[in-house]
Amino acid sequence: MPPRESDPKYLEPLLGVAFDLDGTLVLSHHDFGRMRAVVVRLAEQSGVAPGKLTVSDPIHRILEKARDELQASGAPDGVVYRFEAEFHKAIDAIELEALPRTTVRPGAVPLLQGLSDRGFRLAVLTRSSENFARGALQRTGLATFFPYLRSRSSAGPSKPSPDALLALLREMEVPPDRAVFVGDHLMDAECSVAAHVRFYAVLPDPSEAAGSTQTEARFLAGGAAAVAADLPHLTRQLGVTPPQPTPAR
């Protein structure tokens, strides 16, 4: 079947690869349940009626709904700004608690080294704070691979807004049709597809897979061009062969 006119036209060769961070390249086991509960509590303290928000939503959706509820109720701008400042302070603190236990996801180093050796421009696009993202990359030894990073702390839109990914690609000087975005969550697919950037999904690491709703079928339905079981599988999909050890004589 011929492609629809609305389908993005991808050019080869690729020039850049942007990665989600947590779950994709590093494993930090954030307490997302606690984060969601904190956001709901702060929103209600700021004037959102109890029951309007639910902890079953992703954090960015809770935040969006809280803003809408506050604005609809006629809350002064100062109340909204104070809520957002308190939200960022609380979430940043919970994120940093996970930093000491953050580890590199298996296969990340060979993948990134292979891409770097072939001249790809590499970047990170994350909803984590700047402090956590920089700290996690330093702790796991991945910082040297990433001259470009856009976080929740960056000015302008945050993921999953497609404008966040497009802004990062402009910094990288990589056209959207010459890029790939890699992530482990449907939110990453949403961001990439809306930006008309090719998306490659990576299934959750076994240590984080329990109860996950991120499946191959859902990723493909969400617009993923490919789905990898893990980072070594992604390495093969991207045509990056890790260096082979020299045989002993």
Image (cartoon, rainbow, N blue to C red):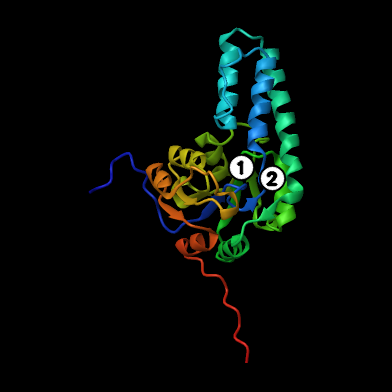
Write the residue at 52% across / 50% down. 182
Helix, strand or loop at label 2? It is: helix
Please say if the residues under marks 1 and 2 sit with CB atoms less than 8 Å apart. yes
Q: Residue furthest front?
A: 210
Write the residue at 72% across / 24% down. 85
Q: Residue furthest bottom?
A: 249
**Residue 114 location (% of width, % of height):** 57, 65
* Res. 86 image quadrant: top right
Residue 131 shows up from this direction: no
Q: Residue furthest left?
A: 1
The tag on residue 133 is: 2
Q: Residue furthest top?
A: 74
Is 4 positioned to the left or the right of 83 in the image? left
As shown in the figure, which amino acid type bears the numbered disc 1? Answer: Thr
Is 221 positioned to the left or the right of 25 in the image? left
The tag on residue 160 is: none
Write the residue at 67% across / 33% down. 34
As shown in the figure, which amino acid type bears the numbered disc 2? Answer: Ala
Crowd band around label 1 with a 10 angstrom C-alpha radius: few (<14), some (14–19), many (20+): many
Helix, strand or loop at label 1? It is: loop
Q: Which residue is mark 1?
A: 126
